[in-house]
Image (cartoon, helix red, strand yellow):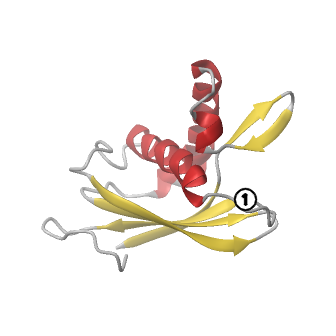
Amino acid sequence: MIHKAIIALPTYTKRGKVLLLSYNIMRNMHYFSLNTAKQNYQNDVLGDWVKTLPKFKRLHVCYKIFFNNKRKKDLDNYTIPLQKFLMDALVKGGVIEDDNYEYLLGFSSCFGGFADENYAVVELIELAPREDCHADH
């Protein structure tokens, strides 16, 4: 079964401005600021979507990422915070027991295009007990 949603990309606040969080920013952030960004994101996601999901035993995740401007970006720099924050929210929300390789078999991301907001279309794909993840997910 596939569960699909549109969710915002992670952000952080700097000098009163809300900015899009990339891995380049994330790796240099003070742990307190990073934890605040993660908690804010988890609260947003837990309140909206995660509470409606069933419990998954094995999972593959697909992200289609949209940006609100045409400035060229490295897709992986925005996938990493999204993946980390969302998987931690799924564990916290009881959707998956853990985000290690026994439960989360993999993830993929692709560029979706340009939009008015920064967001991702997320597909949670439940895998059968002996099913491997494939490139066609």
Give residue 53's quadrant in the image: bottom left
Give the residue at mark 1.
118
Q: Is residue 96 left or right of residue 53?
A: left
Q: Is residue 18 left or right of residue 27?
A: right
Q: Amino acid at mark 1?
A: Asn
* Residue located at (39% from left, 61% from top): 107
Q: Secondary structure at mark 1?
A: loop
Where does residue 114 sit, x and y in percent of width and height? 75, 71
Number of marks in picture:
1
Where, quadrant-wise, is the N terminus in this rendering? bottom left
Q: Is residue 97 left or right of residue 47?
A: left
Identity of the residue furthest to the bottom in this view: 136
Where does residue 87 sit, x and y in percent of width and height? 43, 46
* Residue located at (34% from left, 63% from top): 60
Give residue 29's quadrant in the image: top right
Where, quadrant-wise, is the C terminus in this rendering? bottom left
Where does residue 32 sit, x and y in percent of width and height? 61, 19
